Amino acid sequence: MDAVTYPKNEVIEFLNSTIIPVRIPSDAKPLADDFNLRWTPMLVVLDWNGKEHQRTVGFLPPEEFIPSVLLGIAKIHFDLDQFGDAIKIFENILSHHAGSSAAPEAVFLKGVCGYKNTHNPTPLKEAYEKLQASYPGSEWTKRALPYRLLP
Amino acid sequence: MAHTIQWEPDYGTALKKAQAEKKPILLDFFNPG
């Protein structure tokens, strides 16, 4: 991460403007135990009250790092029932990072947000159709499979 | 904007800042070698 991802200007500007970045050595106690750290690098996205909403383990290249962190931030809003805010971030991921590993999950969760926001199942079916068309091999396409049967 | 990541080294300080600014936190656990 230090050699490849963190020196990139777009990563620097993204982190400094979007989130409060914290670096903690893996031997820091009790924090490493509090977060059940088992391997590094481990990246955890927390809300402003310190509640965890996403974690990743292992190296992320620059083109995966930003969409991964955006996905974590969107999950904060999703978990807080702030579906409109979550949808905006999912759409950002899909507009600017459509080829990233985070994109299929963003399609899936955007559909769920759309449903929870309106109680209309159409966004779920649209999510499946988008996943099937754009990410046919993704695990998220498999998870959305039942939505193909929705009216 | 500074061309380096403005890492906060202390979690407690970061949490107070996050609460004040209503901003999320990215916690990076790294191997100090």
Image: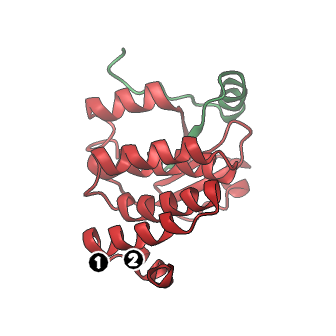
Q: From where the camera sits, is residue B33 visible?
A: no
**Local SS, label 2:** helix
Earlier in the chain: of badge 1 and badge 2, it is 1
Where residue A141 is drawn, which disc sits there?
A: 2
What residue is shown at x 69% (from left), y 36% (from top)?
A48
Q: Are marks 1 and 2 in contact (CB under 8 Å)?
A: yes
Is residue A130 found left or right of A147 in the rendered image? left
Which residue is labeled 1 in the image? A136
Chain identifier of the residue bearing label 1 in the image: A
Report the amino acid beneath label 1.
Pro
Question: Residue at coordinates 64% horizontally, 62% vertically from top-left?
Answer: A119
Residue A80 x, y percent position in the rendering? 70, 48
Residue found farthest to the front: A151
Q: Residue at x 66, y 52 (%)?
A: A52
From the top left corner, tell me how far across and down residue A9 is, in percent: 27, 29
Image coordinates of residue A143 in percent, x first then y, are 48, 79
Residue type at tag 2: Thr
Query: A7 or A15: nearer the eye?
Result: A15
Q: Quadrant of residue A105?
A: bottom left
Q: Is residue A12 above or below residue B3?
A: below
User: 10 Å neighbourhood of mark 2: few (<14), some, or many (≥20)?
Assistant: many
Q: Colour of chain A?
A: red
Choose top left, top right, bottom left or bottom right for residue A131: bottom left
Q: Write down the chain letter for disc 2.
A: A
